[in-house]
Amino acid sequence: MSQEMSQPIVQFQSVDKRFGDFEILKGFDFNIQRGEKVVIIGASGSGKSTVLRILMTLERIQGGEVYIDGTPLWHEPLPGGGSKPAGERYLHRMRTQVGMVFQHFNLFPHMTALRNVIEAPLRVLKLPRAEAEARGRALLERVGLGDKLTAFPAQLSGGQQQRVAIARALAMQPKVMLFDEPTSALDPEMIGEVLGVIRELAEESDLTMLIATHEMRFAREAADRVCFFDQGRILEDGPPSQIFGEPREARTREFLARVDA
Ligand SMILES: Nc1ncnc2c1ncn2[C@@H]1O[C@H](COP(=O)(O)OP(=O)(O)OP(=O)(O)O)[C@@H](O)[C@H]1O
């Protein structure tokens, strides 16, 4: 394997993250390989969202560095060598390489489904309109919404809105897709359709995906690797068959028993 191929697409290197006096991440290391589908599980407050939010540049870090495809996120390289703390424009550029699907879909209410999906490709990537529309149509079809191109968010169910949000994130052709509890704001009957779309993406695409969820069955079925978070650390990390079938750590076993997995 060449050097480039073996370089992780996402790399947390000795990251420290504090909220005031509370240090949730301390010397945190975490690598994701290109194309890997990683699901993170763990109790509420264990740091799952924090890790995703750092990658999305919604949270700053106090120490260490995060690399996306080998490029530092928080230290902006200077042309003559060296680096400075990342500025807003640099962060914006880095952010466009990361797709994020949140718990709440946050679609633009005054835009149709198609317009929601193509807005960023038009404005940020400056794609020609015809190309952006073709991409948007194809993606909405892919998430099962080919017949809802002109619907407004208020005319769509929560599950449909979340599927538009997935298409919207994919439209930027990100290097990594992040999902932060993508079904926890949905009514129970809509969870399956959204998890189904994400599982299909995991099975059929070479996208790199990082998904925080409380849906253990989904984790079993969709993940290449499951990471159990405990108090800001990855306590245990392995294929779903190992984490669910033969968890090594007592705290993993307790967590899985508690969530009935
Ligand atoms: N803005 C903030 N200010 C202070 N503390 C915070 C902030 N954001 C997160 N925390 C704390 O950091 C810890 C990790 O939170 P995080 O949201 O990453 O957990 P989580 O594993 O995603 O939980 P959940 O499953 O409930 O989303 C928690 O103790 C939380 O209270």
Image: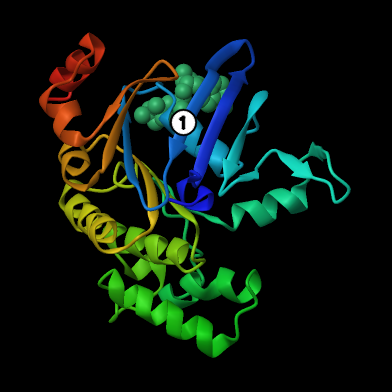
Q: Is residue 133 visible?
A: yes
Measured along the vertical axis of the image, is residue 158 above or below residue 257?
A: below
Where in the figure is residue 138, as x and y percent of width and height? Answer: 36, 79
Point 56% across, 49% down: residue: 69
Point 58% across, 23% down: residue: 14
Q: Identify which residue, 186 or 71, lies in the foreground.
A: 71
Please, what is the three-letter code of the amino acid marked with disc 1? Phe
Q: Is residue 82 left or right of residue 190?
A: right
Q: Is residue 254 left or right of residue 171?
A: left
* Tag 1 secondary structure: strand
Quarter of image, res 229: top left
Point 21% across, 9% down: residue: 250
Q: Identify which residue, 248 or 23, lies in the foreground.
A: 248
Q: Is residue 42 left or right of residue 64?
A: left
Q: Identify which residue, 201 or 237, lies in the foreground.
A: 237
Q: Is residue 261 visible?
A: no
Give the residue at mark 1. 30
Where in the figure is residue 150, as x and y percent of width and height? Answer: 39, 81
